[in-house]
Structure formats: structure tokens, C-alpha cells
Amino acid sequence: MPAKVLINGYGSIGKRVADAVSMQDDMEVIGVTKTKPDFEARLAVEKGYKLFVAIPDKERVKLFEDAGIPVEGTILDVIEDVDIVVDGAPKKIGKENLENIYKPHKVKAILQGGEKAKDVEDNFNALWSYDRCYGKDYIRVVSCNTTGLCRSLYAINSVADIKKARVVLVRRAADPNDDKRGPVNAITPNPVTVPSHHGPDVVSVVPEFEGKILTSAVIVPTTLMHQHTLMVEVDGNFSRDDVLEAINKTPRIITVKADEGFTSTAKIIEYGRDLGRLRYDINELVVWEESVNVLENEIFLMQAVHQESIVIPENIDCIRAMLQMEEDNFKSIEKTNKAMGIQ
Amino acid sequence: MPAKVLINGYGSIGKRVADAVSMQDDMEVIGVTKTKPDFEARLAVEKGYKLFVAIPDKERVKLFEDAGIPVEGTILDVIEDVDIVVDGAPKKIGKENLENIYKPHKVKAILQGGEKAKDVEDNFNALWSYDRCYGKDYIRVVSCNTTGLCRSLYAINSVADIKKARVVLVRRAADPNDDKRGPVNAITPNPVTVPSHHGPDVVSVVPEFEGKILTSAVIVPTTLMHQHTLMVEVDGNFSRDDVLEAINKTPRIITVKADEGFTSTAKIIEYGRDLGRLRYDINELVVWEESVNVLENEIFLMQAVHQESIVIPENIDCIRAMLQMEEDNFKSIEKTNKAMGIQ
Amino acid sequence: MPAKVLINGYGSIGKRVADAVSMQDDMEVIGVTKTKPDFEARLAVEKGYKLFVAIPDKERVKLFEDAGIPVEGTILDVIEDVDIVVDGAPKKIGKENLENIYKPHKVKAILQGGEKAKDVEDNFNALWSYDRCYGKDYIRVVSCNTTGLCRSLYAINSVADIKKARVVLVRRAADPNDDKRGPVNAITPNPVTVPSHHGPDVVSVVPEFEGKILTSAVIVPTTLMHQHTLMVEVDGNFSRDDVLEAINKTPRIITVKADEGFTSTAKIIEYGRDLGRLRYDINELVVWEESVNVLENEIFLMQAVHQESIVIPENIDCIRAMLQMEEDNFKSIEKTNKAMGIQ
Amino acid sequence: MPAKVLINGYGSIGKRVADAVSMQDDMEVIGVTKTKPDFEARLAVEKGYKLFVAIPDKERVKLFEDAGIPVEGTILDVIEDVDIVVDGAPKKIGKENLENIYKPHKVKAILQGGEKAKDVEDNFNALWSYDRCYGKDYIRVVSCNTTGLCRSLYAINSVADIKKARVVLVRRAADPNDDKRGPVNAITPNPVTVPSHHGPDVVSVVPEFEGKILTSAVIVPTTLMHQHTLMVEVDGNFSRDDVLEAINKTPRIITVKADEGFTSTAKIIEYGRDLGRLRYDINELVVWEESVNVLENEIFLMQAVHQESIVIPENIDCIRAMLQMEEDNFKSIEKTNKAMGIQ
Ligand SMILES: NC(=O)c1ccc[n+]([C@@H]2O[C@H](COP(=O)([O-])OP(=O)(O)OC[C@H]3O[C@@H](n4cnc5c(N)ncnc54)[C@H](O)[C@@H]3O)[C@@H](O)[C@H]2O)c1
Ligand SMILES: NC(=O)c1ccc[n+]([C@@H]2O[C@H](COP(=O)([O-])OP(=O)(O)OC[C@H]3O[C@@H](n4cnc5c(N)ncnc54)[C@H](O)[C@@H]3O)[C@@H](O)[C@H]2O)c1
Ligand SMILES: NC(=O)c1ccc[n+]([C@@H]2O[C@H](COP(=O)([O-])OP(=O)(O)OC[C@H]3O[C@@H](n4cnc5c(N)ncnc54)[C@H](O)[C@@H]3O)[C@@H](O)[C@H]2O)c1
Ligand SMILES: NC(=O)c1ccc[n+]([C@@H]2O[C@H](COP(=O)([O-])OP(=O)(O)OC[C@H]3O[C@@H](n4cnc5c(N)ncnc54)[C@H](O)[C@@H]3O)[C@@H](O)[C@H]2O)c1
């Protein structure tokens, strides 16, 4: 019988996880929740998802009824029927949901990258910590930036010993559907301290990188993707070709060439559109081939992260691990990828 | 036998027309052309389109071969096998192609909105000038902005006599895949003269609007959609509901509510993504329901135009008209819409 | 003895009013207030302004002391020494200050455009309502957009009878120093209803325009200036030259030519920078000369509004009117302009 | 007698150099050149600069006359009267001017950062290469990014031995007055190869850094400033305070605190405006105090570069060096700073 999954918070991440779960043959969406009766709620119902109100409160339910969007009840009407909840609530709310709903109702739960590492049992990336999360109850799928770094560092780690990775993250200011957040015309150090918290976030997944990942981050006025420059000091004997091969062999990474027209994140998104990807999602980490370089035991590369979708297949694998549906992480990765059309 | 269509210039418009032609049962893509062997060219081949080089020149062909992208020859190797060419070349090049290639080879051709009204036999919009273009040889499908205006003015015209329409167009600066054009932070009157040329462009489709459409336009730093405010003085006896009904009855217009979350063009695009539209295309003109208003014989409304895709179904209907494949414009519109999933 | 002015809320508007008051010979800044000890507070002190804490609360004062920024006390320590307060607090707070501080302490006060017309005795524009505000106690200087419209409509009104003005406002999303507000990539109807509240705001200054000003507004991702297109139906006998002459004769309007390089709001701001204006402020409404046009009893034009500074000279004149320092509005305008270097 | 300086190319850099030269007591502007009769040309004349046409061609001169902007002739009418030319022409044109005009007329010339290191005798930064450029004929003042890096590396170098500096540059897409260039919504690796050419450009000034400066760069949609993250491995015995002190002691660097409101480049520019700087120029490199950090022999910091103005004082010092007006670079720096109000 397929695993029963509830998506609590059908927003940018939640709706994608719902669709990705639906594409798998070993799990199904039991319901999705929304707080407001907006067009996303209406589309959820039109897609055939059972809609529940995320906040168990009569007035809230009435809002949906008044808007003509039928709901099946509130989260409390479904929570005990599910095998696992994928939380897609905004930053900090995930932890509240964990304490107030998931734990009291003894339901397994996946939180997202907006939550803190310390509030869960462990931190998930399909390449690195699948085994550690196997059978666990409360796990966080790390953020889009961290997921991207975990993938490229996995590739690099497979050809050389990582001594110190220095990374600068240039982050998109807002998601494409967010018409409130800025800045319109500024570069914002975020955080203004260096190194930033992004290194320790990688370490929450890969403890052996403790002290080895130094990151710095800024926010810039774009919506499409994050961009990272990596400068990674390594030990070992290998060539640029070895690095490229390792990148190409690592699941969920693709390479593109500026020379073939991939001059910016805008072109990568155009590619996602042309491929016919749902919502143009690029679940793969994208590495610019020309940027890959090796100089005196240091590996250089530039990568782009489609923030809205990179963590989606990770959520699927995380479900399989937590529900002990598949022991081998690479088998889960392959299964997920195949179902979702990921390279 | 399906009509044989060549797409000359597989760019933003060209690739969409190719895909739209492929979705019809009465026409097929005989080939598409590209000038550069970039990722769009590679994808065209992967999609199964026969690729030709747009510029009939050996070195150009060699570029493609060197890039490992197989081509079937140049445009001259296919031009005489086709029933009609849809030109998708950049502004001003369409006219050159008309004079240098299509006319000499006696092949029917559709030019796009970047070309001038005077360089073709007539100007196409499926609602307004299908009959006039029936059987003609050289026709221009009018621009995205003009197409949008033609649709809403058609709706308004169906309930009231248009005396004077005043329109301000707030235009997107660049397409989403264009990483060269700005401005980054400015509002640019374009043109700086008022009224702008957009009114006369509508008149090229609807001659009876001569002197009745006064437009003004600015460019702003966004990539997603154009936005128009219409203030239309009319004669007649009707209510706001009549206008809304007319809008809803007109093909290729949809209405959205800010109240349901459609607060900006960003949300409309999110809707296109959530609907699973290919490349998130919103071929329909989008009218904000709350903006529709009637005050003392004047109709007000705000609309959004997805510049990359609004003209695509028009190109399909234009093919049918020019090749005399269907006499009734509404039948063609319906056939196109159904094949493309347009409302 | 110069009039004693307190600036309550030393933000974008407040700091400019403070500097403008300092440039006049008949008024002086008695103090300015801040809520947070940031760099603007430090600069205020370095400029020689007496700094008070806007919120009369000991902990708040301590924040300033801890930051090493000396304050003279709180607003309550100075409020009774002043002849008039210019409120520069954020939207809605001005009204609260009026009710909680200015009225109880019986001090005259000017509120800004973020407040509502109905919460004050009258609404100020130096050209239109100086006399009405003469000697009054609680007056609102209307918003940047409304001030801009009042000026161009004054010019137009001087050559022709305004029957109906249709205006579309393309508004900057955030001020240049605002790194929080978006959108990054969207056009937002604001409000989504048409006509918008901007027409009635003009009417709050010029009651005879009741029903004659129809406006619509969108927000776009730029920080520099607002832009308006005006289409004004008029009665009268006049030429384009008459309109241009009226514009040029009206104080606080300048004209620029796209042909001379003023292709966008970015170039207008560059002009303010090159002129050596403090903070590059363009207190004048800016009209594009090429946009001015007359067609069949309708006047067309495009204008740009530097939102941060256009209302500053109006605040100065409003002080003079409310404190009965000068009976003739044009004398006050001229005095203000001369002191501030405004054309 | 003051040194006679011609500014060839009165654009973003040229007009600032002209104003900076005018502020010095030991040099004067003999003339400035423009190619087009736009508002910048008109302002140059209004400021009292003698205007020459940059392109010695009668029709070009006529353009200015027709626009009513008086010129004193062409560059050829003034070139032999000057002691030195500061070239402010666009990228690549500087080199053409060097070969076609300056060398044939045997006049000393300063080129800007858009030109190549190899096309001049040496590369100038006031802290590092003043002596090397002393008395030379053809010198390039390095680019805004390189100038910024030279300054912070100078500070770091004064407390510790630089072993390897890794820098990621986040570059503004276009200058504020540029309404043509994009991207509107993308991050563009530029160049896509890592390391980028910015490291070697620093080496052109400081040869001992050969192989020690590894850089990577992207372009983002903002106009205000560039931003850099530096991660510098060093040898030596020092504390964070030593680094901060060195930064504060180095001329033409200022530090700001996010905690005091400097949360982004937008706030830094607001500071320049509030300070009353001409055109709001921040000639100093700006370092975020909170970002300065020392961890295991590695120094971290974030800095912002006001691209339009950082090189201006360098041009002044370069004039003094090339014309042998002052032997001691620090004396020249101090003199320039004092005249320009730079910290
Ligand atoms: N968007 C991204 O780029 C991205 C990438 C990776 C991780 N994340 C993380 O994913 C999480 C969700 O982010 P998002 O971007 O999808 O946010 P979002 O704002 O798009 O969606 C959040 C959804 O949660 C709902 N919600 C609000 N309160 C709720 C509650 N109390 N209970 C349940 N649902 C509630 C909202 O209605 C909305 O549908 C955050 O932790 C975020 O940090 C986001
Ligand atoms: N993009 C829009 O928003 C939009 C909307 C409506 C109409 N249009 C019009 O459609 C036309 C095409 O615009 P686009 O946005 O698709 O441009 P585009 O730049 O995306 O694509 C143009 C394509 O034409 C190819 N090309 C270049 N030279 C050519 C030649 N000599 N012969 C054939 N092909 C050549 C290019 O390689 C490219 O693939 C223009 O007239 C434009 O004004 C564009
Ligand atoms: N910025 C513009 O473009 C613009 C143009 C015209 C009118 N206005 C209007 O001017 C007013 C001020 O806007 P702004 O842009 O200067 O805002 P701002 O945010 O730049 O400045 C507001 C200032 O008020 C201070 N403040 C906060 N709470 C306060 C309180 N309780 N009492 C006193 N001061 C307080 C803040 O510390 C800040 O210094 C608003 O009504 C706004 O609508 C703004
Ligand atoms: N703008 C910056 O951020 C910046 C910073 C540092 C260095 N630079 C460098 O400074 C140089 C000038 O850049 P800018 O930004 O001032 O450019 P700009 O485009 O603002 O100005 C260039 C000026 O040169 C004039 N010009 C054009 N052709 C000319 C010719 N043949 N001879 C003389 N003048 C001519 C133009 O009319 C214009 O006034 C470039 O090398 C650039 O790389 C620019």
C-alpha cells in the first residue's frame, strides 16, 4: 500500500512536493493544507487534492466556504490518518507545527530548510545522510543553498579530499511569485558577518566537513536562481576532466556551457521552460562547464540553484528513508529521478 | 494532407509557433531555422524538428556541424517545399526575409509584430481581420500589445459603441531569457511622444477605430508581462455586468481577481506555471476583474499581456486563413484553442 | 524672530524639510526627532540639529545613549516651545501623532501625504490652496503624486478649461534607500480598482475638479521617480505652444527633452546629480517637452515626479501660510524657491 | 603655474575628474570634450568648462552648433596646449585615442580601467604604484574593482603577509544613468571562467601578488555599487582589531556598521546623499565593520565599491605623479583628499 503523505502548507515548496509525491508509485497525497482560499487553493482542488485548512479554526474554514472552495475539514481531521507529514509552512512555523501538531499526534514529519538543524533529529540530503535518517521521526530537508552545496561537494569529494571549501553565495531576493519582498536596487550582505551560517548548515548534513566550509552570502535583486562560486582546496591527484566526470556522474547535477548560450541564470530558466518541465523546475544543480577549473590543488566552479525546486526530490527520498521504504539511497534517488524526469 | 509550415527564426515566437503548429491536426512543421548552434537549436533537434540554417552560407552550416548539431541544410533547401513560412526573425529582419526570400520563392509568409503594417498586404487578428486575410499571401500578425488591445476592444465593442479609447501601456523591458537589455532601474517613455504608435497599430487591424484609439507607452524594468490601463468612452446602454459578460464570452480572454491572490503580473505567471502550461505560457489576455468599471459612459479596465505567447494562437489562425483551410474565424479560433488548451 | 519648527520624524521627508527650513531666513529648526539611533540620527547631530527621541520612553532614550548619539530629551521636552511641527512619521503614524501629541499640546502641525484628507482641516498645495490654509492649525501637504498633478493641472488650467483629465500613474516601488520593499520583478496594479484614489486626492486640494480627474495606478520595480501620462480634455482656444508656455511659467515645473538625452527617469536623476543638488533632489515636476501635444481639444503630456523631494518646498510654503508669515502665495513660492535654488 | 589638464570624454568618469581637477590648487581644466550635444555637454558649458568636440570632424561640430551649445573647436585645437590628457572615453576607445592622438601629439595621457594593462607603460594606484608611474607618459588608472581591491589589500598587507586572497566580485550591471544595459532579472557569470581577470589586474599594480589573487565575478541587476567578499590567507601574528585599525588607517577606506543602518549598498548611497557629496559620490572604499573577521590565519571582509567615483582621486594623484608635481605619494593623497573632502 502506498505511503500516505500529508502536505502541510501548500506553498512554493508544498505544492511541488505534492506533485512529486503524486508521480511516485509507492506514495500518495492524502491531503494538502492551505491557510487562505486563494487561487493556489482553488487549483489544488482542481488538481484533485483533498484540501484541509491548516489552521484548525471555524472562522478559517468559513473563509474557504465563502470563497466557494470546498474543504474536507482541518488538519486535525486528517493528521492521524497519515504516515508522514511534509511541512511546507513558512520559516519558523515549521518548528511550531512540529511541537504543536506533529509530536502530540505522534506523526512523522519532514521540516524544510527554513527551520533550524537543532530542532530535528537529523538533517537530510539524499547523497550524504540517507542512512542516518533511516527510520527517524523528525527530519529536516536542508535549504536550497545547502542542498546545492551538498551535491557539488559530493562530486568533488569523490575525486579528492576536501581540505577547505570557500563559497560565496549570491542569493535571489524573492521567489518569482513574491511581489512584496525587495530589494529593488541594492546588494545586501546577508548575513553581514563572514563566514555565514551556510557552512555550518552543510556541516549539519556532513559532520566531517566541520571547520572546512567557509561561506559568505549576499542578496541581489533577482528572482530566478541563486548562484555560487566555489573555491575548494583539496588533496589528491586528479585532473579537470576527473572533476567534470565526477560532476556528471553525480545524480541531480547537470552541466551547461555559456558557449552554448547559457550565459546567465535567465538562460537556464529558459532551458527549463523549453524542456517542458512543470513550472519550468530545474531540480538539478546546474554547473557551468567553463567555470570548472583546477589550479594547484584547488578546484573552482560556479553553480546555479533553482531555489523553488532543488529540494523537491530530496523530500521524496527523505520520505522513503524515514518510512523505511528503501534501504539503498541510490535506488531511491534513481526511482525518484525516473518518476520526475530528473537527469 | 496537413499544411506544411516552415518556421524561419526559432526564437521566442518561432519556437512557440512550432510547438503550436505541432499540436494541430491540420498542419505540420516541415522545418525550423536557427542562425546559431545554441541550446535552443539543440533542443529543436531533440524535439524532432528538422533544423535548417537560416542564413544560406557554408560557414554558418559549418558552425552547426562543429557544435555537433545536425542540420538538414539551409533555408533554401526547404523553402520551396512549404505551403507557408512563419517568420520569427528579429524586428526588421522579417521584412528583409520577405523581400529576399519569401517573395522571390513565391511562398506565402506570416510576419510578426516587429515589422511594419505597410510592408504586408494586411494585418491579422483572429477576431477582427480573419476574413480580410483569407487567401492572402503576405500578412503580419500584429504585436503582443496590439493583439491584447484588439481582444479587449472586441469585447467592449460587443456591448457598446466605442467613441474614444485611451490606453496607457506599461511595457516589460526585456523578455525573461534576455540578459542583455535593460533598463535596470528606470522608467523610459517609449516613445516619448503622445499619442504613441500603438493606437495606429490597432487601426491597422480595425480601420473603423481610426482616430479613436489614443495610446501612450513606457518601458519598466520587468520581464514577465505588459500591463495596460484602458479608459474607453462609449455610447450605449449597458452595465458593468454586461461588460464582464462580454469579456468572459470573448475567446482568449480570462479574468482574474486580485482578491483571489492575483495581485500582480508575478502571480499571473505563477498561475501559468501551476496550470502546467508549456513554458508557463498565458496565451489569453488577462483582465483584472476588480478593475472593470463603468462610470458615465466610460469603461475602465486593467489588463496584462504575456508578450511571449499571446500572439501564438493568432499565428495558427492566420495560417488557416491564408491557406483557406477554414472559412469561419470562430471555428478556427475554437479549433486552435482546443488543441492548445486555451480557454 | 524666525518661526520655530520641529521636525517629528527625521526620515526621507523629514530630513529634507529640516534642511529646507534651515535655508530660509524666516524660520529655523528647533529640533528633529528620531526613533532609532542609526546613521541618520548621527548625521542629524553632526549637522547641528538638536535631536530628540520621537517616542517619549526612557528605554528608547537609553538606546541612543548606548549608541553614543547625544539627545536633548524626548519630543515632550520640546513640543511646547515650537510654533509648528512638521510631521514626517510613516503613513498612519502622522494621524496618531496629531491626536496624541499635537492637539493635546495645542501646537500647529503639518501632516504628510500618507495621511488622510479627512483627518485634517485642509489640504495644501502652494499654487492652489495657500489661501484656504492661511492661519489654519492642522493641514496636510498632499502626496508626491498629487503635488505633481496639482502643478501640471495648474499650468493646463491657466490656458484652458479642464473638462476631464485622465491620468495613469506608474509608481516607483520603493525609495532608493529602502532595501526591504519589492517587487523585484512584477507590475502591481495599486489599487486594482479604476479609477484610483489619486483623483479624489487632487480634489481634496482643488474641489472644483470634483468628478473631473480619473486616475489609475501601477507599481513597478524602480526606485528613482514616478511617471505619469496625462490626457486632458479641455475647452478653449489655444495651441501646443500656449501649453508649453504655461508649463514654463508655472513655478516648480521644468521641461526636459528626450532629444537632449533625457530618455528616462535615470537621466533626469543624473541631471540632478550633475547640477550638484543636495541628495540630487529634483523638487520640480519634470515634463518631457516632446510629450506635450494638443489634439482636438485634448492635451497630452508625460511627467516625472521625484517622490522624495517634490513636496519639500510645499512644506515650507505651508508653514508660512499656517503661521501667517506671508499673505501672497506667489511671494512665498518665490522666496522658498530662491532659498532652495529651485527653478 | 597649475598643470593644464584636458578631459577627453566627459562621461561618468570624465566629468568627475574634471570637477576633481578644478578642486585642486595645482592643476586646472583646460577643456573637456564630448561627442554629442546632450544635456551633459550643456551643463559642462554652464559650469564654465571650455568644450571641444572629441571627434575632429566638421559635421560633428555642426551638431553642437545646431543644438545651441557653443564649442571652442575640436580636440585638435587644444591637444598641444595641455600638459596631460585624462582619457574618459568608453572601453577600447581609450587605446585608440592613445595611438591616434596622444602619442602622435606627444602629450602625456592617463587611460582608464576599461583599457588593457599591456597597452600602457604602467598601472596606477596611489598606494601601490605612485613611484613607478612617476614621470611616465602613458599610464592606466586601474578599474573601480581593482582600485577597491588594491586599497583593502594594502590595509591587510600592512598587518600580515598575504599568501592567497580569494575574492568574489558581485558587480553592478549598469551605471545609474545607463538606461540601456541589463540584465533586468538574471545573475550573469562574467567571465564564466574562474579565476577571472580581476586577479591579474591587481597584479598589474602589485606584481608581488602574482599567483596570489584568485577572483571570480558575476553581474547582478543593480546600479549602485559593486560588492566584494574577500577571504585572505595570511601569515603573521595579529588580531581582528589590528586588521580594523589597519583599515581605518589606510587612506580612502571607510568602515560602516550594518548595526547602524548600513544594511545594503542602498544605505551607503543614502549616506553619500545625506553627507551632501557632489553626485553623492563615495570615493572611499567602504568596508562593513561586522564582516571583518580573523579565523586561523585567514582574514574575511566584505566591501562595497562606488564604481562611478572610486577612481577619481586616483586620477588626480596620477596626474601629480606623471607630471612630477609631488614626490611623496602620501602627500599627494592627502592633498587630493583634503581638496575633495575625502576621508
Ligand atoms: N521558496 C524557496 O526558495 C525555498 C527553498 C528551500 C526551502 N524553503 C523552505 O521551505 C519552507 C516553505 O517555504 P515556501 O517558500 O514554500 O513558503 P511559501 O510562503 O511559498 O508557502 C508557505 C505555505 O505555508 C502556508 N502556511 C502558513 N502558515 C501555516 C501554518 N501555520 N501551517 C501550515 N501552513 C501554513 C501558507 O499558506 C503557504 O501556502 C520554508 O522553511 C522555507 O525556508 C523554501
Ligand atoms: N518576444 C516578444 O515579446 C514578441 C511578442 C510579439 C511579437 N514579437 C515579434 O516577433 C518577432 C521575433 O521576436 P522574438 O522575440 O521571437 O525574437 P528572438 O530574438 O527571440 O528570436 C529571433 C530568432 O530569429 C533568428 N534570426 C536572426 N536572424 C535571422 C534571419 N536573418 N532569418 C531568420 N531567423 C533569424 C534568431 O536566431 C532567433 O532565433 C519580432 O518581430 C518581434 O517584434 C515578439
Ligand atoms: N518618501 C516619499 O516618497 C514620500 C513622498 C511624499 C510624501 N511622503 C509621506 O511622508 C511621510 C513620511 O514618509 P517617509 O518616506 O519620509 O518615511 P520614512 O520611513 O523615510 O521616515 C519616517 C521617519 O519617521 C520616524 N518615525 C517612526 N515612528 C515615528 C513616530 N511615532 N513619531 C515620529 N517619528 C516616527 C522614523 O524613524 C523615520 O525616521 C508619509 O506620510 C509618506 O506617505 C513620502
Ligand atoms: N563607469 C564606471 O563605473 C567606471 C569605473 C571605472 C573605470 N571606468 C572606465 O572609464 C572609462 C570611461 O567610462 P565611463 O563609464 O565614464 O563611460 P561613459 O560612457 O559614461 O563616458 C564616455 C564618454 O566618452 C565620450 N566618447 C565617446 N567616444 C569618444 C572618443 N572617441 N573620444 C573621446 N571621448 C569619447 C562619450 O561621449 C562619453 O561622454 C572606461 O574605460 C571605463 O571602463 C568606468
Image: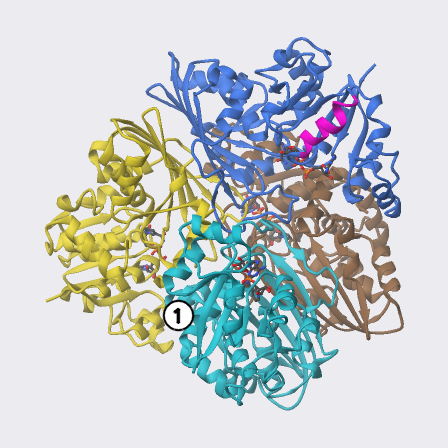
Chain colours: A yellow, B cyan, C brown, D blue
Location of mark 1 (residue): A39
The amino acid type, in three-letter code, at marker 1 is: Phe
- In magenta stretch: residue D102: yes
User: Can see residue A69?
Assistant: yes
Query: How many neighbours does mark 1 have within 10 angstroms: few (below 14), some (14-19), or many (20 or more)?
Result: many
- In the image, is residue D185 above or below residue D272? below
**Where in the image, quadrant-wise, is ligand 1 located?**
bottom left
Q: Quadrant of residue B246?
A: bottom right
Span shown in magenta: D93-105
In this orientation, which residue lies closer to the viewer: B74 or D85? Answer: B74
Chain under numbered label 1: A
- In magenta stretch: residue B310: no
Q: Can you give x and y, in whole percent of width and height, for residue C145 in the image?
A: 67, 58
- Relative placement, left or right, of C218 versus A163 is right
Q: Can you give x and y, in whole percent of width and height, for residue D276 in the image?
A: 68, 34
Q: Can you give x and y, in whole percent of width and height, for residue C118 in the image?
A: 63, 64
